[in-house]
Image (cartoon, rainbow, N blue to C red):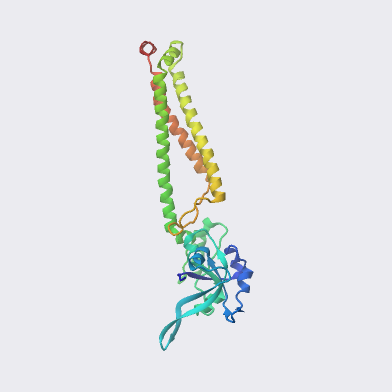
């Protein structure tokens, strides 16, 4: 098969940990040409993204030809550079955009392929705290100055993060609507209970129960329903998120989404805020039925109850 790809040259001594499943030693050893069984000379090693290898229908040990438009001028016109590489293995980041378009070779092989001499087109810096990348990038550009420029991982994936932020906002609105529907169900249940227990409420008030105590009974009853639902939902959510995080059984079409599996991360603060919000909404839903119950006239309720 034929497919476009981004060819990245790396130093195996320092960047081997970037590539999953293949050691830097394997890439380094494959840089030396070897004679194949058919007498041809195998090219240096290359590591392909798993989706890219799948689209090319190549396996470990197969050969691929890399063609770059940066070639030579000949009497017949511009001739692109072509070189054979041996597939050493695959890497998988879980992001289709990279797994379907990225390939790694030794930096010396990339320089030779692109006729760059000892020059490089960029340097990738890994930081311990990814959330300080913006601050570190500013310090780097201050040191280097023009014509160099720096892009951090947040700038490179700006569209993705904007989409995720919008999605999170929409999901919060949907979740709030679901909780409000549940709250209306609690309110309607309590209203039905007030209508059914009219005579019982009247008897309690005739026996000396105050309006406050009647309100407490219905508020407490509604809060029990809301609390049980909230804690059961939270517990089931924790279990499902744990299973999703461990087994990743929900797959996403890689050609549509950036990721191939549904990413899961439990944010305890978000869980606490959602649970407390659900309880507050449930409490508000109990106030009207409880107020109606406390306002019942015991004489009228017993007479018409």
Closer to us: 208 or 85:
85
With respect to residue 206, does 11 lie above or below?
Answer: below
With respect to residue 286, does 20 lie above or below?
Answer: below
Among all residues in the image, which is located at the extreme bottom? Answer: 75
Among all residues in the image, which is located at the extreme front? Answer: 38
The quarter in which the C terminus is drawn is top left
Residue 176, x across and y down, in percent: 41, 39
Q: Which image quadrant is residue 201 in?
A: top left
Q: Name the residue rendered at 46%, 35% in the picture.
A: 278
With respect to residue 245, does 202 lie above or below?
Answer: above
Closer to us: 296 or 248:
248
Q: Is residue 131 visible?
A: yes
With respect to residue 292, does 167 lie above or below?
Answer: below
Closer to us: 63 or 291:
63
Residue 111, x across and y down, in percent: 53, 77
Residue 244, x across and y down, in percent: 53, 48
Residue 103, x across and y down, in percent: 52, 68
109 displayed left or right of 305: right
Q: Is residue 142 visible?
A: no
């Amino acid at each position: 098969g034929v497919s476009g790809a981004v060819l990245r040259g790396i130093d195996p001594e320092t960047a081997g940990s970037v590539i999953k499943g293949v050691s830097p030693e394997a890439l380094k050893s494959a840089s030396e040409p070897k004679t194949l069984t058919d007498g041809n000379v195998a090219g240096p090693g290359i590591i392909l993204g798993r989706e890219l290898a799948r689209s090319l229908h190549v396996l470990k040990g197969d050969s691929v030809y890399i063609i770059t438009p940066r070639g030579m001028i000949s009497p017949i016109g511009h001739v692109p550079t072509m070189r054979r590489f041996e597939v050493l293995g695959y890497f998988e980041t879980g992001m289709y955009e990279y797994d379907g378009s990225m390939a790694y070779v030794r930096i010396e092989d990339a320089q030779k392929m692109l006729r760059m001499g000892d020059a490089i087109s960029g340097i990738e810096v890994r930081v311990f705290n990814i959330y300080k990348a913006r601050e570190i990038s500013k310090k780097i550009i201050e040191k280097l100055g023009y014509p160099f420029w720096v892009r951090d991982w947040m700038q490179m994936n700006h569209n993705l993060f904007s989409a995720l932020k919008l999605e999170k906002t929409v999901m919060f609105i949907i979740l709030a609507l679901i909780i409000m529907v549940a709250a209306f169900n609690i309110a309607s249940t309590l209203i039905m209970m007030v209508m059914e227990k009219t005579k019982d409420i009247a008897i309690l008030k005739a026996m000396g129960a105050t309006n406050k105590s009647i309100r407490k009974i219905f508020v407490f009853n509604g809060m029990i329903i809301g609390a049980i639902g909230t804690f059961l939902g939270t517990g089931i959510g924790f279990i499902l998120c744990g299973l999703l995080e461990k087994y990743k059984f929900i797959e996403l079409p890689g050609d549509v989404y950036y990721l191939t599996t549904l990413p899961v991360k439990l944010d305890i603060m978000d869980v606490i805020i959602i649970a407390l919000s659900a309880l507050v909404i449930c409490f508000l839903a109990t106030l009207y039925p409880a107020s109606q119950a406390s306002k019942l006239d015991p004489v009228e309720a017993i007479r018409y109850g």
